Amino acid sequence: MKAIKDFSELGSGYQLAMKDMEIRGVGSLLGEAQSGQVNNIGYDLYMEMLQEAISDLNGKEIPEVKDTQVDLPVNAFIPGTWISNREEKLEAYKNITTCLNNEQLTELATDWVNRYGLIPEPVESLFLIMKLKLLAKKCGIISIKLKKPNLILHTRMKKNAFKHILEELPTNIQNKFVFQSENEISRIIIRGLGVLDTKMQIENLINWFSLMSISVEKLLTQEIKI
């Protein structure tokens, strides 16, 4: 499976064939005998294991998301009383929206405290929203919307992939998620979360997506050795 992933470009057939011979062994060129790993376990079992590996990976791709839309009733902004200069404020918005991870957000928050003083509540909310967006993006979530009493997520991932990334969550939390498959963009309902205040909604989502991102990392780095 790793060889197939590595040599998926057009014209890679020769390299894939060479890798196949490396894995299975050349065997008898004029007969049915095999060598290499397949000789150790038998051709039938080898093919069975290969098919199981393909089936296990099928539908577990995490789709790339450029940006996650968060549509929640939260006051997340930079007050003019905190950064009064218009150009500095625009630069501040640019800096926070281009952060790629939580470490960069933390560094930016420290810099803002040094420059402008203690961070006001709307800016704290802005940092929470940005942290949520980064985690949701990593988990393949396109949008997050409130529809009381629930929250609605949208994603292009398949149900098999979503079941996999839920594995790090406690069972009682997993049961809150309902996946509704659609042709292109599916819905994920988080039951009951919409009745909490917005800050609690965001903090819960951040905690859950943080755990789900662990499963995403495992899925992306998974290597199947046959």
Image: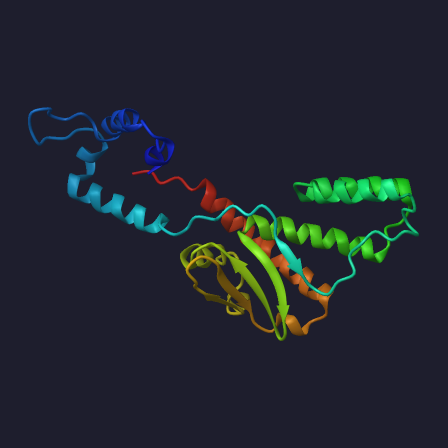
Frontmost residue, 165 versus 133: 133
Residue 201 place in picture, x, y as percent: 67, 65
Position of the N terminus by quadrant: top left
Q: Is residue 58 left or right of residue 80?
A: left
Residue lying at 35% horizontally and 40% vertically, measured from the top left:
224
Residue lying at 88% horizontally and 40% vertically, measured from the top left:
114
Q: Residue furthest left?
A: 31
Residue 148 place in picture, x, y as percent: 63, 74
Residue lying at 62% horizontally and 75% vertically, measured from the top left:
149
Residue lying at 66% horizontally and 41% vertically, measured from the top left:
100
Q: Is residue 66 above or below residue 73?
A: above
Position of the C terminus by quadrant: top left
Residue 30 place in picture, x, y as percent: 7, 25
Q: Is residue 9 above or below residue 60?
A: above
Q: How is the image coloured?
A: rainbow
Residue 127 place in picture, x, y as percent: 75, 51
Frontmost residue, 34 versus 137: 137
